[in-house]
Amino acid sequence: MKKPRKKATTRPERKTRGSKAAKPVVQGAAGLDALFRPRAVAVIGASRRPGSIGREVLRNLVSGGFEGKVFPVNPKASVLHSFKCHPTVTAIPDPVDLAVICVPKKLVLETVKQCAKKGVGAIVVITAGFRETGPEGAKEEKRILDVTRAHGMRMVGPNCMGIQNAQRGVRLNASFSRNFPDQGPVAFVSQSGAMGEAILAHADRINLGVSMFVSVGNRADVSANDLLDYWARDESIRCVLLYIESFGNPRNFVPIARRITRHKAIVTVKSGRSKAGALAATSHTGALAGADVAADAILKDCGVQRVGTVEEFFDVALALSRLPLPQGPRVAVLTNAGGPAIMATDALVASGLEMAPLQKKTAERLRRILVPEASVQNPIDMVAGATAQNYADCLRLLLDDATVDMVLVIFVPPIILDPVEVAHRVFETVKGAQKPVVGCFMSRDEVMDDIAASAPQDWVPVYLYPESAVRALAALDERRRILERPEGKVHRLRVDIPRLRALLKPGWQGVEVRRQLAQAYRIPAVPGGLAHSPNEAVAIADRVGYPVVMKMSVPGMPHKSDVGGVLLNVNDAPSVWNAFARLMRPDAEGVNVQKMLSGGREVVVGFTAHAHYGPILMFGLGGVFVEVLKDVSFALCPVTDVRAREMIRGIRGYAILEGIRGQASINEDELVAVLQRVSQMAIDLPEIAEMELNPILAFPHGVVGVDMRVRVEERS
């Protein structure tokens, strides 16, 4: 039985003759019902010419089962697809909610004006040749956008493939894609039409279930942000898929995505990972914080799950859209072949998941069910003769085991057993289970197609290889951790920002400015000072105590040790006097004399300003090897205390900070505080293009900054 159709609520009111009141610009999710739930659709540029986009869009609307009215528009035809054809959209006697524009580029602006005159609620401009072609195309696109905003219309495109809504009561395929998946718990937005077509085709094949799809094209009006906001209100959507090449407005994306991921999973296969997009910078932070790092930081901060390939896109989407979340990371593997189980175990451990230990009673019951040759320790190898009934019985025991959070079922088909039958026994056994189960059926493609085609609506995701199945389980566990992550707090200090701004001048900042910045933000610094003469150097060394470190102070020099500009363990006054003469040179502002400290673990904290994303904070193992090891993590500023701790614990070398071979752990709370203070500096003083503390020495009793670099950019 079909659900009653939801009434469209976004049809704009018609302006009465003589009225001069301007319609407001419609933004955000407002007005998108006219796109996704129209009562009437006009196809402007509809055609009977084979291969034309206008013909494909009209055909797809009809063959897809659209439940509203369809109006072809073409001044050179009277009937198309058995529908009466109208010369213009204004000649249609009925109201029109949505217009799909497939006319040549030179006619688009006038067509949009006619849609505005008609009172159309939304348009999809499939025609290309606008901003993507250069400045002239961008100007023409803006003219179109000005018309839509002046009349309160929403626009998808231009240069797009169209939109789809497969939900019952709508069945809208307003695109030129012939792939129209059944409705399901997934919504999908693609910046690339070609990628959108390929993904829709595969989604249909594996029975993913895509309720809504949008090819956003140039994103002149409707963006991924708008769509996320709209889909957040649809309870039938559990998972949103994004294929994006760039963020339209990253600063708007962050709060929207952060809010939505508390309720729905968002998965992206964002492209643009190459080093060619890296920021031009001279600090370690700037050199490592490329454009992809900034995007990755945004996604992590928002709880968006990022994958590297389209294959992973599907692996993760199947699991997140259909399965319950686990209570923890422990996985039981049930198999009839040892080799794939070993591969799965390796992949599980590499993904940060754990092998479930299994309760003693579970192992005893498994032993009673299975043949003597079977292994009842995780992974449970039932051997090749295992039957469909064995799979069902063992799976029930694993689901009842309190040590098991997730189950991976592996099946390698022997000649005597039908994979589809085994799959359906697994589906039946799992029905109603509160733990996620995924399958790995290492069969031929046609067998996998049969399993997907015959599966019930709430079927268990089935993958061809163990690594894909493990990737799905890892995504479920990542989603669990995202939801369990505390909100955290942004702690702020009271700082005299106008006074600090008055100190900053374009270029690399000297020692005195750096010292005042560190004091203002309560960043502990090693005792010392800047000497301008040998006598002053000796006085500083006497004050802080021997031995001392002496460094050439040349603003902007990243690696002083490379030019012999750092002398360690200077033990007495004569040595300080001689060292000053060696280090002082005409372009130096002086020689930095500092107390020699030892025993701490070196870390680096810094930030770099990004024109689109804002300041990006970096943390990692520090010292001279930071660019070699590249063991760093990133986050957007400002960071909460929770996010700062995640950054510290997220590097590969965290065990060094925890303490190895009897060493005490560093004072992590003090390091969290420094990260938040540096983050606050980045927000308070946007003039600072790069700032870095490298190294910071971390001790069990606290932390202390040894070297600091700050570069200011002149702002217009």
Image (tube, grey):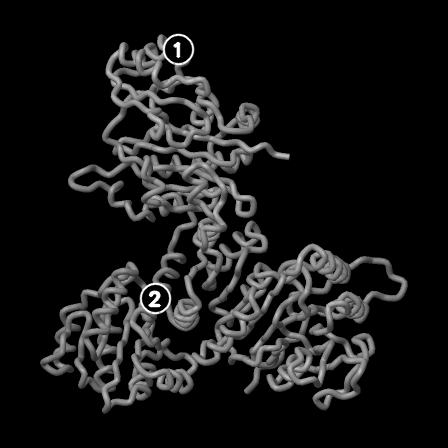
Which residue, given by chain and number where applicable, does mark 2 sit on? 471
Which residue, given by chain and number where applicable, does mark 1 sit on? 533
- In the picture, measured across the screen, residue 660 lies left or right of residue 30, that is left
Q: Residue at x 37, y 69 (%)?
A: 324
Residue 520 visible at all: no
* Residue type, mark 2 in image: Arg
Category of crowding for the residue at label 2, using alpha-carbon neighbours closer than 10 angstroms: few (below 14), some (14–19), many (at least 20): some
Q: Farthest residue in the top direction?
A: 535
Rendered location of residue 427, percent (x, y): 34, 82
Vertical placement of 306 versus 692: above or below? below
Q: Quarter of the image containing the C terminus?
A: top right
Mark 1 in CB contact with mark 2 (< 8 angstroms): no
Vertical placement of 260 versus 58: above or below? above
Q: Residue at x 56, y 44 (%)?
A: 611
Label 1 to label 2, Cα distance in Å? Answer: 62 Å
- In the picture, measured across the screen, residue 491 lies left or right of residue 245, that is left
Q: Residue at x 26, y 67 (%)?
A: 331
* Residue type, mark 1 in image: Ser
Rendered location of residue 437, percent (x, y): 32, 73
Vertical placement of 656 versus 61: above or below? above
